[in-house]
Amino acid sequence: PGLLTLVPPLLICHATGLTLYFLPVLGQHVATQHFPVSESEAVVLTVIAIYVAGLAMPHNTHRVLTGSGSERGWMTLKLLSLLYLAMQLGCIALVNFSLGFLLAVTMVPVAAIVQPKGPKYLYAVLLVLVTPAVTLLLSIVLYQELIEYPVSALECWQLFLQAVSEGLLDHYLYGSIVFPFIALFVYPCWLLLWNVLFWK
């Protein structure tokens, strides 16, 4: 029964990753009928909405957990999350070393220290800062500063939306693996760490 309590978070986190991968493209026509946006904007905004909705994940997964308050439960989930992250980083480094390096530098230190005890709000801020979406946003800001062409917050947001859109387009037109890797593997792993932080 100890390991069975980890099945709901694992299933829910990966179902959210599948939703992040499939729903934006499948639901773009519905979104354009109900909101005044183009199809490309609908896809990007749906991706961002699903991504942000993952922040509520611990509150939903803990409703189905029985006996989840044990210390052994969150430690086991953290161990699985760290092993899963290590496997992902090892695999992606063989295909795209720069992406693997960037994810390792940002995610591994925070993943190693996160726990439901201690300064929970500090851990939450650090975890949000190392999500791939925030890493992309901060990379855009840093790039603009390095080329000495600083942009406003609105321009930075537009560049972020354009980068997400181009990432999706690269995947569907050219078969780039970055978007499916982030949606199906990195994001669920991050959600598992988010569940560790808010373990009850």
Image (spheres, helix red, strand yellow):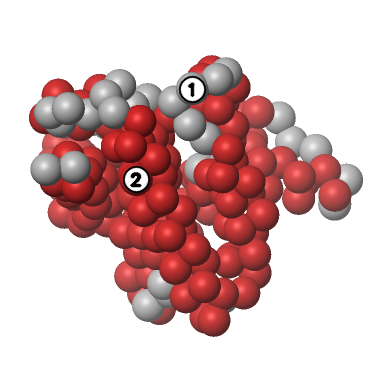
For label 1, the SS is loop
Residue 117's mark?
A: 1
For label 2, the SS is helix
Residue 138 lies, with reference to residue 100, above or below; the image says above
Residue 94 lies, with reference to residue 47, above or below; the image says below
Residue 167's mark?
A: none
Outermost residue toward the right? 148
User: Residue 25 at what x, y percent from top left?
Assistant: 23, 55
Determine the image quadrant of residue 93: bottom right
Mark 1 and 2 residues: CB-CB less than 8 Å, in contact?
Answer: no
User: Residue 200 at what x, y percent from top left?
Assistant: 30, 21
Determine the image quadrant of residue 156: top right
Check disc 2: other Cα within 10 Å, few if <14, some if 14-19, many if 20+: some
Q: For the residues marked 1 and 2, what is the alpha-carbon distance in whole angstroms? A: 15 Å
The answer to whether residue 17 is visible is: yes
Q: Which amino acid, by three-letter code, is at mark 1? A: Lys
Q: Is residue 105 left or right of residue 181?
A: right
Q: What residue did someone put label 2 on?
A: 76
User: Residue 74 at what x, y percent from top left?
Assistant: 35, 36
Q: Earlier in the sequence, mark 1 or mark 2?
A: 2
Foreground pick, 61 / 184: 61
Question: What residue do we see at 71% from left, 41% from top?
Answer: 141
Check disc 1: other Cα within 10 Å, few if <14, some if 14-19, many if 20+: few
Question: What residue do we see at 64% from left, 64% from top?
Answer: 101
Question: What residue do we see at 54% from left, 81% from top?
Answer: 94
Outermost residue toward the bottom? 94
Question: What residue do we see at 61% from left, 58% from top?
Answer: 104
User: Residue 103 at what x, y percent from top left?
Assistant: 58, 57
Foreground pick, 36 / 81: 81
Q: Which amino acid, by three-letter code, is at mark 2? A: Thr
The quadrant of the image that shows the N terminus is: top left
